[in-house]
Amino acid sequence: MDSIRKIFQETEWREELDPEIKRKLEKILKRVKSEEEAYKNSKYESTAQIWVGMAELFSRIDRLDRRLKRIEKALGKVRREEKHLKDVDLEESLKKY
């Protein structure tokens, strides 16, 4: 019996988890299970499952990093435009006086 199946069957310890943590754990376990064909061929199946889980987590972190960079880039552009508008307003105000 592989580790994922065992974890799904051994529910006692999981019932004590915070519901949000439990939901996230189950989501990761389901994603890892989708790669079962790959890790089934490993001599050390449970270790391969852990590596698949780590790769899944890294993938999620990588997506968040890319999203954060896009947001930071957009905010930087907005800030530069805002500064430019303030500079133009200041310049026009100074010309009046």
Image (cartoon, rainbow, N blue to C red):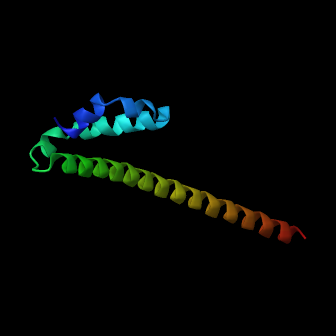
Towards the viewer: 82 or 73: 73
Across and down, in percent, residue 34 comes to: 22, 36
Above or below, 61 relative to 22: below
Q: Quadrant of the N terminus?
A: top left
Quarter of the image with the C terminus in it: bottom right
Q: Position of residue 59 (x, y in %)?
A: 33, 51
Residue 62: quadrant of the picture:
bottom left
31 relative to 42, above or below: above
Residue drawn at x 69%, y 64% is 83
In terms of depth relative to the viewer, which is nearer, 65 or 79? 65
Residue shown at 26% from the left, 49% from the top: 50
Q: Is residue 38 left or right of residue 23?
A: left
Q: In the displayed structure, does residue 67 sit left or right of residue 91?
A: left
Q: Nearer the viewer, residue 24 or 3?
A: 3
Please state if 8 lies on the left or on the right of 17 as rendered.
left
Lateral position of residue 27 relative to residue 92, left or right: left
Whole-percent x, y for residue 89 in the image: 77, 63
